[in-house]
Image: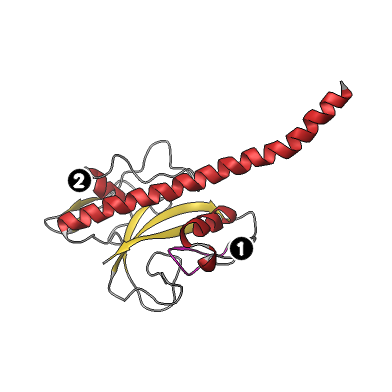
Amino acid sequence: MIGVLAIIAILAVVIVPKVFSTIASSRITSAVGSVSSMKSAVTEWAGKYGTIPVTTATASARIDDLLIADGMLEGRFIVSVGTPPPAVPVGGATYNRTTGVWTAGAGSQATQSRIICAASVAGAVPATGTNYQLDGLTNIPAGSRIVSAVIMGVPITDAREISQRIDGDALTQPSGAITADTVGKVVYAAAANANATTNVYIYIAHQ
């Protein structure tokens, strides 16, 4: 009996970490897939209406709500990494294509994972979705409109894994790093420590 228990204990030590690692990996895979789906919907909307409206006009605006309203998405951008959405969704802004004006919704979306569109700014790449160095060197021209997926409250290890999946090793921080990632399609601010979280901004498209 003691021998059997010892074998079970050894197997648990070996297998359990792999199970959790597999679960974490599947969540990252799902998140990356969701971003790809958003890109298709954004491209379709821009092709139909010509441009994507910036969401900085109101803190309750989000592009995924706009895509839902036009039948190009079935639901909001929600991923299984980062801070989960509230049980009761926070009402977002609505967009009037005729006037080009957002009407503020029931509450701010600033703490929610979402799709945003920001006017690009010149200079260094901040982890706010307002610019990217897609090749690791060159900023997107000032005045462009940049669509990004924002994932809030992501563990720094998961943030690095998302970057590695999308940008590859060349544009990803080294394993174990908690420093900011400011190059490639995935950017995020530095974390306070290895157990802390950060907000991840993922490039989708620009015009």
Q: Position of residue 116 (x, y in %)?
A: 33, 57
Mark 1 or mark 2, which has the lower sequence index? 2
* Front position in the image: 169 or 63: 169
Label number found at residue 178 = 1
Q: Where is residue 180 in the image (x, y as percent from the top left)?
A: 54, 67
Q: Is mark 1 on a helix, strand or loop?
A: loop
Residue span colored magenta: 182-190
Which quadrant does the C terminus fall into?
bottom left
**Eyeballing the image, is 28 above or below 189?**
above
Dot 2 alpha-carbon crowd within 10 angstroms: few under 14, some 14 to 19, many 20 or more: few
Q: Which residue is drawn at 40% across and 79% down?
A: 123
Left or right of 123? Residue 147 is: left
**Eyeballing the image, is 126 above or below 35?**
below
Which quadrant does the N terminus fall into?
top right
State the residue position of label 2: 70
Q: Which residue is drawn at 50% across and 59% down?
A: 163
